[in-house]
Amino acid sequence: MRDLHLSLAEYSVFGSILTIGAMLGAILSGTIADWVGRRCAMAISDVFCIIGYLLIVFSKNSVWLDLGRLSIGCGIGLLSYVVPVYISEITPKNLRGQFAAVNQLMICCGASLAYALGTCITWRTLAIVGVAPCLLQLVGLLVIPESPRWLAKIGHSGALEEALQKLRGKETDISEEAADIKDFTEKLQHLPQSKMLDLFQKDYIHAVTVGVGLMVLQQFGGVNAICFYASEIFVSAGFSSGNTGMLAMVAVQIPMTALGVLLLDKAGRRPLLMVSAAGTCLGCLLVGLSFLSKEHHWAKDLNVALALMGILIFSGSFSLGMGGIPWVIMSEIFPIHMKGSAGSLVTIENRLVIKRIVPVDQKFC
């Protein structure tokens, strides 16, 4: 973005305004998904993202960049809620957890691919590339079935069976599962309508503390600072270019996320979270020591080695557990009739937590 000559403040706003858009999208996500359905909600999020990327591609100043980033954030906030809900509603019970974990793996793969591409193409070209998966998903949404559970909720029994048959295959007998979905939906409608304030009752306060606490710790660990400014951190620590470090970070994230998926049910949520949190703590410590070494003019190779090890350990450890497990735990600890309100609360809180932004040198703007 050097060609736009952004100031330090404008560069920082661009980096952080995504969070505001994501928070707005999260606030509206539950209402939109229940009103127009899961497929249409995902389509709306794609439109937000496409508009955002196009604004960035054709940007003439920082205002265009910020509006584009804000629009992308709205799409991300909406997708963060709708996609896990859709996955949980179309998959069989015995595969639901694995599909949810694979969703996190795909998110990591997409982010890693974007990092890798960013090392060899310009930022405008990268924004054009970002439009492609959004258009691909829009086309795909035309052929995938709507959530059977949402169809049951709005009383479309015929469409429910048609969608379920498409999901399970033409030769599969879906009568029992369709009946279970209808019975479950009827029971759910007889439960008291939950509100967000109900979560703070004595019966749910422990679950709320766990869910919200995990999201706060996930964000305050520094993940957004690492994600947004990893390249600048590498250069500031002494690398001639941030590209080498970025490619190394990508190479670590994907296998560590895959390992987390494999260990999620075998090792358990809590032990994996503890290992992940310890690793992110160690990574931050090593990055801090790198800049301490630079300040005191210790060996230059030591600065570079500590920065590289710190960011790789942080990224790998975060991918192992802290990135995805809080979302899995959140979906497991609340009763069914409170999941909608709980999901909205936790998603909003996740986007609302103040992101600590790493100061960057003016020359990178």
Image (cartoon, grey):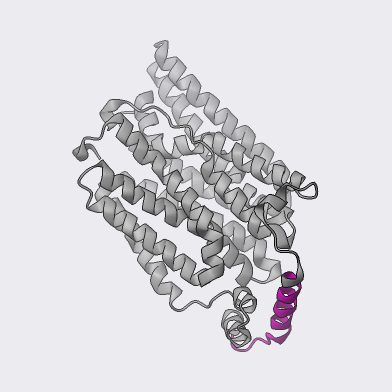
Which residue is located at x 56 percent, y 45 percent? 350
Is residue 230 inside the magenta stretch? Answer: no
Which residue is located at x 28 percent, y 26 percent? 362
Who is closer to the viewer here, 187 or 113? 187
Is residue 184 inside the magenta stretch? Answer: yes
x, y percent for residue 86: 57, 67
x, y percent for residue 180: 74, 78
Is residue 200 depicted above or below 133 in this figure? above
Q: What stretch is highlighted in magenta?
A: 169-188
How many numbered dots are placed on residues in this image?
Answer: 0
Is residue 271 depicted above or below 309 in this figure? below
Which residue is located at x 52 percent, y 42 percent? 352
Which residue is located at x 32 percent, y 59 percent? 51
x, y percent for residue 322: 60, 43
User: Is residue 231 visible from the viewing direction of this image?
Assistant: yes
Position of residue 340 in the picture relative to residue 333 (left or right):
left
x, y percent for residue 244: 36, 37
Please, which residue is most extreme toward the top here?
296
- Classify the position of the C terminus by image quarter: top left
Is residue 3 depicted above or below 299 in this figure? below
User: Is residue 133 visible from the viewing direction of this image?
Assistant: no
Please, which residue is most extreme toward the right here?
203
| Magenta residues, dominant SS class | helix
Position of residue 173 in the picture relative to residue 37 (left or right):
right
- Classify the position of the N terminus by image quarter: top left
Position of residue 151 in the picture relative to residue 8 (left or right):
right
Image quadrant assignment for residue 228: top left
Who is closer to the viewer here, 189 or 276? 189
